[in-house]
């Protein structure tokens, strides 16, 4: 009795499902017929295809710099359901399906999307812990790998560095131009400790990627990827290596070797390097000439050693062009021994000094207007005394103090809180122009450049005897304006060159 009842119920349900399915199918066909009569279908196929291309959301991983052609392919699925004409047009346009995307929005249709790409250039975008076997299989196919121009791999917390090198970065890539790889490493995981023995012999982590075939690669970014490429990248112009939690087993000579393998490098960013890298030295290491480099950033180094020591070790092994902009950041001023840590082999030809002081940091920049090269140092001021900050400035500018002709200063803090204005200006004997961005700096500056009352009319009785122009902020009080006129007059009587003070574009 029960069996026959269940059988009858099952048959009835199957019949209902079949009716509902047929009804939905009929409604879908009816809707497609109605949509096919829309006036928009009268547009040329090229215009419709262009409209379809705007449907897909652009994809670019956080932290990626530069262009990206990756699109969210799953956004196209509703288009192919509108009508037969749209479906045939969309599926027959390979460029619409040229991104093999796997993320939270979808990851099951990789093989189907690839079937419509024909011979179009491909972009691969993965934002999951692990790519699907279908995508891994496609990457292993020479006919697919040879068409990939962009590769974006994000998250990948289920991948070890060795798996990454052997599975996802092992295919020959003759057309590859941009690579972005970010591993998500948990800070408390066994492989994330930063406190590795600095003196331990590191393992060789230099690994050949893309089977040694990536002749067109222009941009390479690794985030928490401890392996170091051993390839020769002839056309690589942008290199970014950043580390937050993963351990690193390569050394400074390994890093220098990678830089030497990138003769066209224009932009290099080294973030979060362990400060013990410089402790392992190779006597055979030669200086690396980067003749095309236009921008070099080193910062936020991790570890117990002084970050400035590592920065100085890197810079001393590089030969940089005169127009290169160097930025050093993430340094704690209270941990420095300025006259040993900040005496860097840079900035000899600089003639412009800029100092920007905030409540938490100080930025010192040396610039050469002739070559457009610059060196910028960013220090955290937490816990640092004004004496230590002043020594840091003195040590940093000592290499070119005599050649500095222009000084620009802006500060959220009062001048004595970070240095003595008299001592600062005494370091710059040949300065010809001083620019102050904040009104509260003016009074101390005027006191510093006022000739000594006991020095007589000699020119040497005043700081900065070649100072010709003062650029001051506006508005100034009547008392400051009166003091300004008095100081300028006294300097002129001493034979100094100060002839003009500019306040809000007006001469005083």
Image (cartoon, rainbow, N blue to C red):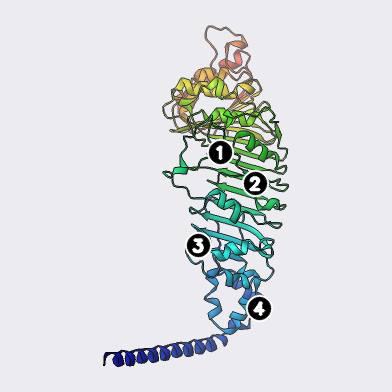
Residue 103's disc number = 3
Q: Which residue is mark 1?
A: 249
**Relative vertical location of residue 452 with respect to residue 298 in this rendering, above or below:** above
Outermost residue to the left: 1
Residue 419's disc number = none
Which one is earlier in the sequence, the residue at label 2 or at label 1? 2
- Classify mark 4: helix, strand or loop: helix
Looking at this view, is 237 or 313 the one in front? Answer: 313
* Contact between labelled residues 4 and 2, with CB atoms less than 8 Å apart: no
Mark 2 nearby-residue class (10 Å; few <14, some 14–19, many ≥20): many
Which one is earlier in the sequence, the residue at label 3 or at label 4? 4
Residue 388: x and y in percent read 48, 21
Which one is earlier in the sequence, the residue at label 3 or at label 2? 3
Q: Which residue is mark 2?
A: 238
**Label total for image:** 4
* Contact between labelled residues 1 and 2, with CB atoms less than 8 Å apart: no
| Residue depth check, mark 3 versus mark 4: number of the one nearer the observer | 3
- Classify mark 2: helix, strand or loop: strand
Which one is earlier in the sequence, the residue at label 2 or at label 4? 4
Residue 20: x and y in percent read 41, 89
Residue 45's disc number = 4
The CA span between labels 2 and 4 is 38 Å
Looking at this view, is 446 or 390 the one in front? Answer: 390
Looking at this view, is 324 or 370 the one in front? Answer: 324
């Amino acid at each position: 009795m029960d069996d026959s009842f269940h059988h009858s119920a099952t048959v009835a349900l199957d019949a209902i499902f079949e009716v509902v399915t047929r009804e939905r199918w009929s409604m879908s066909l009816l809707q497609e017929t109605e949509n096919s009569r829309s006036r928009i279908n009268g547009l040329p196929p090229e215009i419709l295809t262009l409209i379809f291309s705007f449907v897909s959301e652009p994809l670019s991983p956080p932290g990626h710099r530069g262009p990206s052609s990756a699109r969210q392919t799953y956004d196209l699925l509703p288009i192919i359901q509108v009508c037969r004409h749209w479906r045939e047009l969309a599926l027959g346009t390979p460029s619409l399906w040229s991104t093999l995307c796997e993320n939270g929005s979808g990851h099951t249709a990789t093989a189907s999307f690839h079937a419509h790409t024909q011979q179009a250039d491909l972009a691969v975008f993965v934002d999951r812990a692990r790519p699907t076997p279908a995508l891994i299989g496609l990457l292993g196919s020479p006919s697919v790998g040879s068409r990939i121009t962009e590769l974006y791999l994000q998250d990948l917390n289920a991948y070890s560095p060795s798996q990454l090198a052997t599975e996802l970065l092992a295919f020959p890539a003759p057309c590859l131009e941009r690579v972005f790889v970010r591993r998500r490493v948990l800070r408390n995981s066994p492989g994330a400790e930063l406190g590795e023995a600095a003196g331990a012999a590191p393992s060789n982590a230099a690994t050949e990627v893309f089977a040694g075939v990536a002749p067109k690669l222009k941009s390479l970014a690794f985030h928490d990827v401890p392996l170091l490429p051993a390839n020769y990248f002839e056309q690589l112009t942008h290199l970014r290596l950043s580390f937050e939690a993963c351990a690193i087993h390569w050394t400074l000579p390994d890093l220098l070797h990678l830089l030497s393998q990138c003769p066209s490098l224009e932009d290099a960013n080294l973030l979060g390097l362990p400060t013990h890298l410089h402790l392992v030295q190779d006597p055979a290491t030669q200086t690396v000439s980067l003749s095309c480099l236009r921008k070099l950033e080193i910062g936020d180094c991790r570890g117990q050693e002084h970050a400035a020591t590592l920065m100085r070790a890197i810079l001393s092994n590089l030969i940089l062009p005169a127009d290169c902009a160097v930025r050093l950041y993430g340094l704690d001023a209270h941990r420095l021994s300025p006259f040993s840590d900040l005496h860097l082999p840079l900035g000899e030809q600089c003639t412009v000094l800029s100092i920007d002081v905030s409540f938490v940091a100080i930025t010192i920049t040396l610039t050469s207007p002739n070559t457009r090269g610059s060196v910028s140092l960013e220090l955290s001021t937490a816990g640092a005394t004004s004496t230590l900050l002043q020594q840091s400035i003195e040590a940093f500018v000592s290499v070119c103090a005599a050649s500095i002709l222009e000084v620009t200063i802006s500060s959220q803090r009062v001048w004595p809180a970070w240095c003595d204005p008299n001592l600062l200006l005494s370091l710059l004997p040949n300065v010809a122009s001083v620019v102050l961005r904040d009104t509260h700096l003016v009074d101390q500056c005027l006191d510093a450049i006022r000739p000594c009352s006991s020095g007589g009319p000699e020119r040497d009785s005043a700081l900065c005897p070649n100072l010709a122009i003062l650029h001051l902020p506006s508005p100034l009080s009547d008392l400051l304006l009166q003091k300004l006129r008095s100081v300028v007059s006294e300097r002129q009587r001493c034979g100094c060159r100060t002839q003009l003070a500019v306040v809000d574009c007006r001469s005083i």
